[in-house]
Amino acid sequence: MSKRRSSTPPSSMVSPIHSSMAFRYPIGARSATSRASRADRAEAMLYPRWSGVSRWSRSGVRRPALLLALIALVVGTLASGPRADARATPAPLAGLETSIPAQLVAGTTAVVDADGDCLRIRVAPGLAATQVACAEDGSTVTVLEGSVEADGYTWQQVRSDSAVGWAADMYLVPTAPEDPEPIAPVEPVEPVATEPEPVCDTRGTPPGLFGDLPAQGGSALVVWGGGTTAGIVHQAALRGVTLRSVWVLNDAGRWTSYIVGAPRFVNQRWYEHFPGGRIPSPTALFVIAEPPGTGPATGSIALPVTTANAPRHSGGPAPEVEAAAVIVVDAASGKVLHEHNARTRLPPASLTKIATALLAIDGSDLDAWVSADGDYGMLDADSSLMGLAAGDCFTVRDLLYGLMLWSGNDAALTIARHVAGSDAAFVSSMNAFVDRLGLADTHFVNPHGLHDAAQFSTAYDLALLARYAMTLPTFEAIAGEHSWTTSGSEIILMRTLNHFLSSYDDADGVKTGFTEEAGKTLVASATRDGRRVIAVLLNAPDRSSAAATLIEWAFTDHTWPR
């Protein structure tokens, strides 16, 4: 799947004129009431506004030296007598009446004065708007109704030949007024906001838990590379350490604790200190570990506790659907409402990406920049892709949407390498994670789900995985999103491939999958009246319709306690 790139090339986004110089930045702008002189404009062309060079110190020339040079130039000019050419310097007051800019009037014409360059005509006012034409220096344009300020420029709507658009008015010189030609009213156009170019800064603390952990029990000071407490506990478990609690110094200089495995209300102060439960990178933490053999098993992750009594079956039998394996589960209680071959090991295809997303959400800073390495040669030619190329730079959050909405196998590999350092290390972490969840019939050999005989799961295990995943607000938001636009090195508009989300009114997630060997797979979630039902279908030719049928049966043929 190809990615959709911005239609505006980078060089056309940075200047109202098309410069033949090596750099292309916005050059001297004027306010709404004053026009920059040609000298100011020349200086602005040579020295961009944000080049980091002081106005009074260009290339090391400081203000006193510049003033002395100007004085010498003036003295030399006076000594040589008046010049006869048309560019003689006017007396200080002689040109005062011409320093006030003439107004651009709709229905008149104006001449492009861009110092030999062409003037960009854009589809809307703003440096980010798409260029529709470039009016040659000295050419004439027709002034239309409409003037808007945006990005430090005043933009005038004009017609150049057959193109209609917006141009920076500081490069337009009004011609002598004639009888104005009638101009049709033009709808006002909102300014186009100019987003700053993203900075792909991949420096900083990488994902992970850094420091010596107390393998024999006790306490230690560590640094966390960003994520959640679940990610901290998982990283410790990978090193054979079971954490009892995690501590952080709050803004008042006091310790705030997170007790592992305790109900949320016990850890309320922790969540007040870290809204949403996300811990930024880097954060210094104090951890206390259990002595070996005295705490809960290193592998255990508590699945969501039962928050409601199980629903009672009050209607007919579950409808028959075509699928190799099926399960329907009440998310709150965990009760299985219907199953067929749910414990049979089958290839999960891209449902694998649910586990990949969970490890990234729990174990990394979602706003960290990641540079794609482009090493995706192991992917099939017809593989589903986000469209990453070597050097592309996106945040972890963007990559997660590419993983879940477009099922990008390249996004899966990029996430794996960022979070764990290598594909193999990430897969090892995936298997440790599902072991801790108690998913005994699940095994991974890659983070994307392309077929491998050694990669398998069951409808039952996938239902447990989804039940856990949908308790995490970040995962729930991504899994239920219909579209997402990236903000990285490329603008990519992604729309979900999960047809179930748009075909069933109460749908709110989660993931589809397909390979020739696995067939069509789906983990579906829907919530009605605050009650969530999860359905898993493996090798189901009509997966979306079948999931909707099963979930509707669950809602209508079961009674939930009030």
Image (cartoon, rainbow, N blue to C red):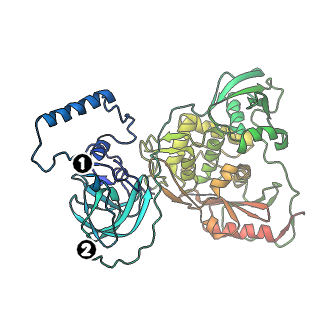
Residue at 86 percent across and 59 percent down: it is 310
Dot 2 amino acid type: Glu
* Dot 2 crowding, Cα within 10 Å, few <14, some 14–19, many 20+: few
Dot 1 amino acid type: Ser
> Which comes sooner in the sequence, label 2 or label 1?
1
Q: Which residue is mark 2?
A: 178
Q: Is residue 296 above or below residue 19?
A: above
- Residue 144 disc label: none
Residue 507 visible in the current orientation:
yes
Give the residue furthest to the front: 93
Q: Is residue 487 left or right of residue 7?
A: right
Residue at 44 percent across and 58 percent down: it is 149
Residue at 11 percent across and 48 percent down: it is 85
Q: Is residue 24 above or below residue 164?
A: above
Q: Secondary structure at mark 1?
A: loop
Image quadrant occupied by the N terminus: bottom left
**Can you give x and y, in whole percent of width and height, for residue 119 in the image?**
28, 57
**Can you give x and y, in whole percent of width and height, for residue 498 in the image?**
59, 62
Give the residue furthest to the right: 562
**Can you give x and y, in whole percent of width and height, for residue 333 in the image?**
83, 55
Q: Which residue is mark 1?
A: 20
Quarter of the rendering containing residue 207: top right
Q: Is residue 107 left or right of residue 316?
A: left
Q: Secondary structure at mark 2?
A: loop
Cα–Cα gap, marks 2 and 1: 34 Å
Foreground tag (2 vs 1):
2
CB atoms of marks 2 and 1 within 8 Å: no
Q: Is residue 9 above or below residue 543?
A: above
